Image (cartoon, rainbow, N blue to C red):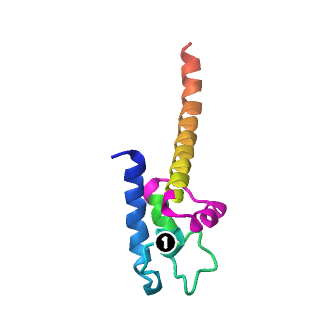
Amino acid sequence: MSKHEEAYEVLYKIYNQYRKQYRENSYDSRQMCLMWSTNDPPDEIEETNPFIDIEVAFNIEISDEDAMNLYDMTLDEAIVKILELQAIASSDCLRVHLSQALPTVAGLL
């Protein structure tokens, strides 16, 4: 199973957990917005439980803008964005480690 497929399965489990809480969302159209009530949508979606679970599962931070964009995506589109955010987070982490290691390496030369 590819990384994309594994990540999709994780996202789909989170999606189903929240989608099934709302009777009006019984049809599985795989739209991210179905993790919230479609009869009474929230005024703000960032920092809601579905996004918090996604942040924890993928070790990412979802900005307000990303939350709004993800809300309007299909799961297929969303997993691509989530994997992009994960790659950015990994590269930022690597950059911090390198910046901490470089002075030590420079001192050895």
> Which residue is farthest left?
1
Residue at left offset 57%, top offset 86%: 40
* Residue 10 position in % (x across, y down): 39, 59
* Residue 64 position in % (x across, y down): 65, 64
* Residue 83 position in % (x across, y down): 50, 50
Give the residues in magenta. Answer: 57-76
> Which residue is farthest right?
65
Residue at left offset 42%, top offset 58%: 57
Q: Nearer the viewer, residue 44 or 28?
A: 28
Identify the main secondary structure in magenta. helix
- Asked whether, in this view, residue 81 is left or right of residue 57, the answer is right
Q: Is residue 58 magenta?
A: yes
> How many numbered marks appear?
1
The quadrant the C terminus occupies is top right
Q: Is residue 104 magenta?
A: no
Q: Quadrant of residue 100?
A: top right
- Asked whether, in this view, residue 13 is left or right of residue 84, the answer is left
Q: As displayed, is residue 34 above or below residue 69?
A: below
Residue at left offset 56%, top offset 64%: 73
Q: Nearer the viewer, residue 41 or 102?
A: 41
Amino acid marked by disc 1: Asn
> Which residue is farthest top?
109
Q: Nearer the viewer, residue 90 or 7?
A: 7
Circle 1 — which element?
helix
- Asked whether, in this view, residue 88 is left or right of residue 57, the answer is right
Residue at left offset 37%, top offset 58%: 9
* Residue 45 position in % (x across, y down): 59, 72
Q: As displayed, is residue 63 above or below residue 19?
A: above
Q: As displayed, is residue 100 above or below residue 71?
A: above
- Asked whether, in this view, residue 53 is left or right of residue 64, the answer is left
Q: Which residue is mark 1?
A: 49
